[in-house]
Every structure is written in structure tokens, then in C-alpha cells.
Image (tube, grey):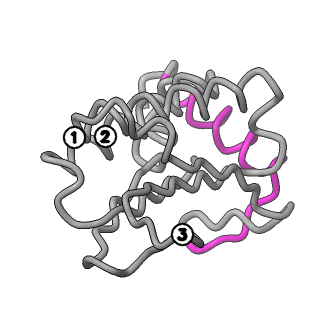
């Protein structure tokens, strides 16, 4: 149930909602989690539109995008890390209508500490998340 944050200057994306949905769905697919409500409802992206001048590199350039992906510990092995960075960079550039943005998109992959993944008011361990997912799969299969 990752959280994705995209930071860019306002106006970078014509349709921030579509970008957020595409990124959330893409990450769910890359993670290869079951297609259950627990993951569909709790994998989300947030597009933060910053005012002009709110970001800069050392040279003063401000035409960058930062994407931060927060997952539970161990959710992304090396192949999945590579896939997230490559696909998110391409999605961001396409959403901006600027193919050169691939050179100016920073993707940060971070993990919540064990027990630090809050869901429904509870700080979950990875084991608890797996158990909750399995319980939901069983309930769905039983028709509950």
C-alpha cells in the first residue's frame, strides 16, 4: 500500500488526477500485489503543485520533478526498484508533454520502518499486512 508524492511547479501537468491514478496503478502492478480492495484503496499518489520559485538546483534551474515512493519494508526487490524508476520517469515526462523531463525527474525510493506502516489507525508490521491481505482474499473467495 505505497504512497507516492509528486512535486512539480504548478502547470507542469495538464491532468494531475490522471497522473496520480496512473502512478498508483503502475506501482500496484510492479509490486505484483493481489488485486484486492486493500491494495486498490490504499495505494495512492499525491501531486503537489508548487508555486514558481519554490524549487531549485544549485544552478538555479527549477524545471524539475521529484517523485517520492514510500513502501513497506522489502516491498521492492532490485528488479522492481529499476522498474519503478524507469516507468515513473517515463510517465511523468509523458504527463508533462515534455520528453526532456526524463533528464530532470528525480525518483526517490523509501521504506517505512518495520511496524511503521499505518493503516486504519494501526501501525502494521509486514507480517500483519500479509495476514490482513490473506484474510481479505479468503473473505472475497468465500463471498463475504
- Check the image and report above or below for 77 versus 122: above
**Secondary structure beneath disc 1?**
helix
In what quadrant of the picture does the C terminus appear?
top left
Q: Please name the residue that numbered disc 3 is placed on.
A: 59
Q: Mark 2 and mark 1 in contact? Answer it, CB < 8 Å.
A: yes
Q: Nearer the viewer, residue 65 or 133?
A: 65
Q: Which residues are magenta?
A: 121-140
Q: Nearer the viewer, residue 106 or 116?
A: 106
Give the mark nearer the N terminus: 2 vs 3: 2
**Secondary structure beneath disc 3?**
loop
Q: Please name the residue that numbered disc 2 is placed on.
A: 21
Disc number at residue 18?
Answer: 1
Residue 125 lies in quadrant: bottom right
Disc 2 to disc 3, C-alpha distance = 33 Å
Instruction: Point out residue 34 in the picture as x, y percentages from the top left corner.
Output: 57, 24
Instruction: Point out residue 45 in the picture as x, y percentages from the top left corner.
Output: 40, 52
- Check the image and report above or below for 78 versus 119: above
Q: Nearer the viewer, residue 118 or 10?
A: 10
Amino acid at each position: 500500500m505505497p504512497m507516492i508524492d509528486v512535486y512539480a511547479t504548478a502547470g507542469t501537468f495538464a491532468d494531475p488526477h490522471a497522473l496520480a491514478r496512473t502512478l498508483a496503478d503502475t506501482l500496484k502492478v510492479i509490486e505484483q500485489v493481489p488485486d484486492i480492495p486493500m491494495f486498490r484503496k490504499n495505494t495512492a499518489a499525491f501531486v503537489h503543485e508548487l508555486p514558481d520559485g519554490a524549487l531549485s538546483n544549485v544552478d538555479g534551474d527549477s524545471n524539475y520533478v521529484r517523485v517520492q515512493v514510500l513502501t513497506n519494508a522489502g516491498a521492492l526487490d532490485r528488479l522492481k526498484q529499476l522498474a519503478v524508476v524507469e516507468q515513473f520517469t517515463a510517465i511523468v515526462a509523458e504527463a508533462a508533454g515534455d520528453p526532456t523531463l526524463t533528464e530532470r525527474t528525480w525518483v526517490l525510493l523509501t521504506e517505512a520502518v518495520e511496524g511503521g506502516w499505518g493503516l486504519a489507525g494501526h501501525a502494521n508490521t509486514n507480517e500483519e499486512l500479509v495476514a490482513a491481505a490473506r484474510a481479505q482474499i479468503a473473505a472475497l473467495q468465500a463471498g463475504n
